[in-house]
Amino acid sequence: MNQVLILTRNILAEQEIQQKLQSLNYEVYCSATVFESYQQQPEMSNFFKYFQYVVLSESICESEMTALIPLLRQHSLSIVRKVETLLTKMDQNYLENEELHAIISTEDSIDELRECFYHLRSKTMDRREDHFRNDKVVQLSGKVSLMRSNTLQPTEMTDETKLQIAEVLHRLSPIEIKIVSILIEAESQVVTREELCHRIWNDGISKSHLASLSSTVTRIKSKFEQTNLESVAIHTLWGKGYRVNQRLFEKIKSDEKFYRMVLNG
C-alpha cells in the first residue's frame, strides 16, 4: 500500500514532488479542495483511510498546521511536512514531539524521498511491534536546515535545570561525553555515524563499532530522558547520522562551565 495524499493551497506547486513520488510507484492524490473541506467538515474522516501518508505543503501556514495535526493524528497516517529549506521552531517542536513524522524539502531527490518513505514505513511497522520505546528517530531531509539557533528566543535556565544538566553530565562515561562533545561542537549540523566512529576509536569503520555507537547513543538518551530537560537529547536522522537537540545545545552553550566540561571531555 503506497497511497500518498498531498494537502496544499496550490496544486500546481506540488507537481514536482508528485512526479518524484509517482516514479517511486506511489499513488499520489493532490488536493486543495480536501484541505479546505477538512478544516470545515472534520466528519469526512473516512476519506483518509485510503492513504498511508499525508504531506502538508509549505503553502499551509503554521496556524493551519496547528488545527490540522490533531485531526490527522486520529488516523493511522504518517504525517510529513514539506518545506522549502528552513525548518521553523514550530515545525521543529512538532517533529521532536513526534506530532510530525518527517520533514522533506522541495529540493529532495528521488533517492532521498525513497529512503525517507522507506524509513517511515519501517518505523510504522516497528511501532506496531513496540520496538521504538528506547530509540526515537527523527526524519529530517538532508536538504532541510534548522533555523540558526541565534534566531530563536534565548531562555534563562533555572537553578533546577542547571542542577539536572550537571548531574547528567557527571553521569556520562568518557565515551558518552565524547559523543556529546562532538555533537555539541557540530551545533545544528548532522554528524554521520562513520565520522563519529572514526573520531571515537581512531580506527576503520566496523560492524562492532557501529553497534557500540548505537547502544552508547541510546544510553545517553536514556540518561537525559530521566530528567525534565528534553524528551530527546540526540536525534537520529534517516540515512544521515546524529544531531544534538537544539534546545539542549542552547542550554549547554549558554553556561560556560557546562560548555567547557563537554568540549574538554
Image (spheres, helix red, strand yellow):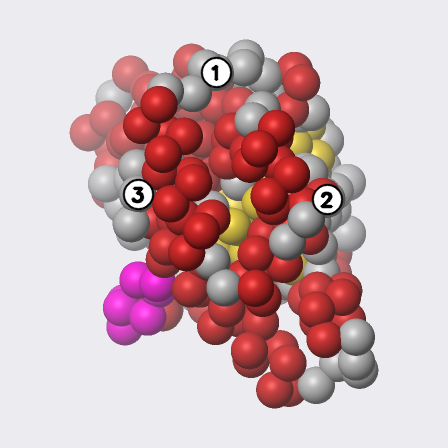
From which residue to which does the magenta span run?
A: 128-134
Query: Residue 188 vs residue 61: left or right?
Result: right
Note whether 157 is above or below 137 in the view shown: above
Amino acid under disc 1: Thr
Note whether 198 is above or below 169 in the view shown: below
Amino acid under disc 3: Thr
Q: Which residue is mark 2?
A: 186
If the image is split into quadrants, where does the C terminus sit? bottom right
Q: Which residue is mark 1?
A: 155
| Residue 198: percent from left, percent from top | 77, 71
Crowding at mark 1 (Cα within 10 Å: few <14, some 14-19, many 20+) = few
Residue 130 colored in magenta in the image: yes
Quarter of image, res 14: top right
Distance between mark 3 and mark 1 Cα atoms: 18 Å
| Residue 93: percent from left, percent from top | 45, 31
Main secondary structure along the magenta-highlighted residues: loop
Distance between mark 1 and mark 2 Cα atoms: 21 Å
| Residue 239: percent from left, percent from top | 66, 62
| Residue 154: percent from left, percent from top | 54, 15
For residue 227, the mark is 3
Q: Nearer the viewer, residue 129 or 147?
A: 147
Crowding at mark 3 (Cα within 10 Å: few <14, some 14-19, many 20+) = some
Q: Nearer the viewer, residue 174 or 154?
A: 174
Q: Earlier in the sequence, mark 3 or mark 2?
A: 2
Residue at x-position 27% and y-position 72% = 129
Residue at x-position 65% and y-position 32% = 146
